[in-house]
Amino acid sequence: MELDIILDGIAKIADTQIAEIKQQTDQRIKDIKTSYKKEADEIRANLEQEGRIRLNREAALIKQQAGMQYLQTISDARQQLIQSTLDQVKEKLKTVRNSKGGYKTLLFSLIEEAMTDLKTSLGNDNTIILSFNPKDKDLVKDYKTDSAYNIQFKFDLDCWGGCNASSSDGKVCVYNTLNDRYLRAIPILQQQLSLFFNEKTAQET
């Protein structure tokens, strides 16, 4: 009888210990799950934050690149417009001789301009050599020269129009062909056209 009581007591103690072990085990599992979920949430939050930072950085970079590309496109387009305008001016000058009446007046004006610039450098030399394109020979025949100077005509230039004026020794020369005037005008035209297209672009944006 006493043995049964003892065995029963042992069994109860064992059941109690087993229950405590099970409870501790369940709590440990629960703590592990809670800790794992917390760590997982932290990792997820960190990844999301890193992702947002990366996306923001990439978006800013793309925006910056797009802005630079836009400015480059505008610059390229503006330069093309400037070059196109210069090319149109060039083609117009190439054909200005076809306007007989208008070109004759222009030619005589260029002659006067070249001679005026040259005279200040001649000193005692009163000889002026005017050089033209052979195509202008008939027009030049109608030009009335200054009697105070010995004007000599040469037709040895390959140009769109206009003339060169030089001293008899060739040491002083005024280049006043349409080709030379166009080349001298290019920097000024580029600057003025650039300002013009900048203003147009600013108005449109």
Image: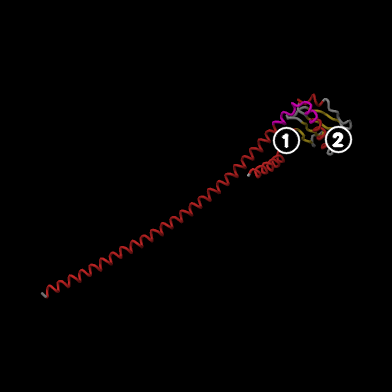
Magenta segment, prevailing SS (helix, strand or loop): helix
Q: Quadrant of residue 190?
A: top right
Q: Quadrant of residue 139?
A: top right
On-image quarter of the C terminus: top right
Mark nearer the viewer, 2 or 1: 1
**Mark 1 sits on what residue?**
182
Q: Is residue 63 left or right of residue 134?
A: left
Q: Residue furthest top?
A: 138
What distance separates the C-alpha of mark 2 from that of mark 1?
30 Å
| Foreground residue among 62 and 28 | 28
Q: Residue at x 10, y 74 (%)?
A: 1
Q: Residue furthest bottom?
A: 2
User: What amino acid is labelled 1 in the image?
Assistant: Tyr
Dot 2 crowding, Cα within 10 Å, few <14, some 14–19, many 20+: few
| Foreground residue among 101 and 55 | 55
User: What amino acid is labelled 2 in the image?
Assistant: Asp
**Mark 2 sits on what residue?**
125
Boundaries of the magenta span:
91-106
In the rendered picture of this protein, how many numbered marks are placed on residues? 2
Q: Position of residue 193 (x, y in %)?
A: 69, 40
Q: Secondary structure at mark 1?
A: helix
Residue 109 lies within the magenta run: no
| Foreground residue among 88 and 66 | 66
Q: Position of residue 101 (x, y in %)?
A: 79, 26
What colouring style does the render use?
A: secondary structure
Establish if 203 lies above or below 110. below
Establish if 43 lies above or below 141. below
Q: Residue at x 17, y 72 (%)?
A: 10
Q: Residue at x 58, y 46 (%)?
A: 68
Q: Is residue 198 left or right of residue 26?
A: right
Q: Secondary structure at mark 2?
A: loop
Q: Position of residue 75 (x, y in %)?
A: 62, 42
